[in-house]
Image: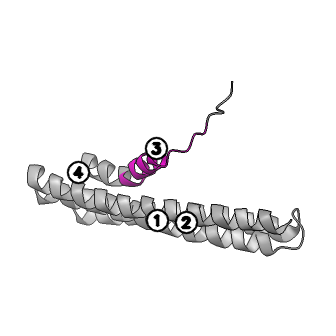
Amino acid sequence: MNERDQEAGVRVADNEAIVVGRVTLFSGVLLVLLAAGGWWTFGWSFAQSVLIGGVLVNGSFWLLKKDAHRLIARVSEADGPAGAAVNMEKTRFFLRSFARLVVLGLLLFVLASQVTIHVIGLTLGFATIMVSVVIIGVSTGKCWVPSKA
């Protein structure tokens, strides 16, 4: 790989890190706005459900981001592109993702047994990352469809 390709790869990685940071920031702001609006409109129990869903999904997104960065770093350091180390890192990534999903489910079960959960509020909290990804993705102005048909 020549120097120009390496510099382009660094620029792309920097841009992706900026976009992920924007998604995280926007999701946090959206979570606060939804919780405040839910508290104002429906009361504290609804806002608490929004906060529970938002904190769980934002925490999971943050951990997924860390695991993805670790996977990319370890795969790029591996000797061969199809080596056993690459397959092991991929397997480890998928196992961590599955374990995180199980832990989130158990944590949600424990919280639901202790606190009154409004399903709509919880769903709104869960949707903060998805809405943030869509809004930030659309606002970046990238065109994913070929411009020449």
Q: Earlier in the sequence, mark 4 or mark 3?
A: 4
The total of numbered circles placed on residues is: 4
Q: Amino acid at mark 2?
A: Ala
Residue tagged 3: 138
Residue tagged 4: 118
Q: Position of residue 80 (x, y in %)?
A: 90, 68
Q: Earlier in the sequence, mark 2 or mark 4?
A: 2
Q: Which quarter of the rendering shows the N terminus?
A: bottom right
Question: How much space separates mark 1 and mark 3, taking CA atoms?
Answer: 15 Å
- Colouring of the image: one colour
- The residue depicted at 72 percent of the width and 67 percent of the height is 7
Q: Earlier in the sequence, mark 1 or mark 3?
A: 1
* Image-based side of 95 in relation to 56, left or right: right
* Image-based side of 4 in relation to 38, left or right: right
Residue tagged 1: 21
- The residue depicted at 31 percent of the width and 54 percent of the height is 125
Q: Amino acid at mark 4?
A: His
From where the camera sits, is residue 44 visible?
Answer: yes
3 is within the stretch colored magenta = no
Q: Amino acid at mark 3?
A: Val
Question: How much space separates mark 1 and mark 2, taking CA atoms?
Answer: 6 Å
Residue tagged 2: 17
- State yes or no: discs 1 and 2 in contact (Cβ < 8 Å): yes
Q: Position of residue 88 (x, y in %)?
A: 78, 68
Q: Amino acid at mark 1?
A: Gly
- The residue depicted at 17 percent of the width and 52 percent of the height is 38
Q: Position of residue 83 (x, y in %)?
A: 88, 67
Question: How much space separates mark 4 and mark 3, taking CA atoms?
Answer: 30 Å
From where the camera sits, is residue 91 visible?
Answer: no
Query: Of helix, strand and loop, which mostly describes the magenta segment?
Result: helix
Disc 2 is placed on an element classified as: helix
